[in-house]
Image (tube, rainbow, N blue to C red):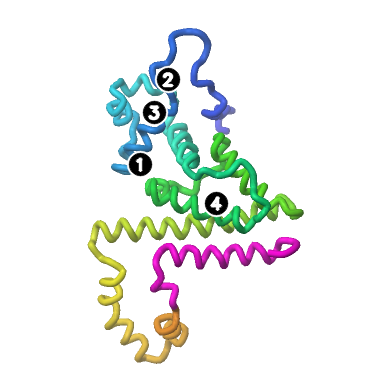
Amino acid sequence: MAGGERHVSIWSVPERQGRGPRPAYSRTQITEAAIRIADAEGLEAASMRRIAADLGTGAMSLYRYVPSRDDLIELMIDHVVLEMDIPERPSGDWRADLTLIAENTRAMWRGHPWLAGLQRPRASFGPNRLRLAEFAFGALDVGIPIDDMVALLDMLNGYVERTVRGEIEWMREMRQSGMTPERWMMRSAPYVRELLDTGRYPMFERLVKDARLPHMSDEDQFRYGLRRVLDCIAGVLPGPS
């Protein structure tokens, strides 16, 4: 780090340091207030000043519990992971376990759309994210190298995050513009017909005439793609898929 500065993880700093009066608030209270605000108004609205107003205290007092904005966001991400309700240990069926992770991750992101506004979260050592990682890696602990596990889980997470970011952006656009998928297709139809009439785009013509995926619900599209990702993972695992 520049200047030799040592990073201190929020997870290594105890909530209550030394003797003295019992803290008026907990990190959990502050984190839950931040999540409520972010869910309702967006992540930028979840400032220390706004959280303090929600809790009925002064903003400066909260920095005793959460030293920085980065710490707050890390606490928020770890807290919402708790909603995924992941079992204590893998079931022994890696496909079922990874499906559970993918579907719960999608539900978590859709329930907290501000997650889509973050860059892909960096590695974190919060207790809930660590527990999720233990479960995910444990599900793939079937005799392959740890680097293969990393690559396969990265592929799975990349599919889930890309898909859900797209869903969230589309929902936001529909709210702002009133443009439903049906209206968009109707508006685009004349130009699509022009393109097809040229005969220059045979694969696009197949996509328009034969593809079922664009006409499925978000849920069905997600599950279809997820099955294909899991099939790819099965191709590099030993034993039956």
Question: What is the number of the mark on residue 101?
Answer: 4
- Quadrant the N terminus occupies: top right
The first of marks 1 and 3 along the sequence is 3
Question: What is the number of the mark on residue 43?
Answer: 1
Residue at the image position 44 percent from the left and 51 percent from the top: 107
Q: Secondary structure at mark 1?
A: helix
Percent of width and height locating residue 206: 45, 84
Residue at the image position 46 percent from the left and 40 percent from the top: 77
Residue denoted by label 2: 64
Circle 4 packing at 10 Å, graded few (<14), some (14-19), many (20+), is many
Residue denoted by label 3: 30
Give the amino acid type for the residue marked by disc 2 in the picture: Arg
Percent of width and height locating residue 153: 61, 54
Circle 2 packing at 10 Å, graded few (<14), some (14-19), many (20+), is some
Q: CA distance from mark 4 to mark 2?
A: 34 Å
Give the amino acid type for the residue marked by disc 1 in the picture: Leu
Q: Which residues are magenta?
A: 212-241
Whether 216 is among the magenta residues is yes
Question: Is residue 5 visible to the viewer in this orientation of the structure?
Answer: no
Q: Nearer the viewer, mark 4 or mark 3?
A: 4
Q: Nearer the viewer, mark 4 or mark 1?
A: 4
Q: Are marks 4 and 3 in contact (CB under 8 Å)?
A: no
Q: CA distance from mark 1 to mark 2?
A: 21 Å
Whether 183 is among the magenta residues is no
Q: CA distance from mark 1 to mark 3?
A: 14 Å
Circle 1 packing at 10 Å, graded few (<14), some (14-19), many (20+), is many
Q: Is residue 30 above or below residue 157?
A: above
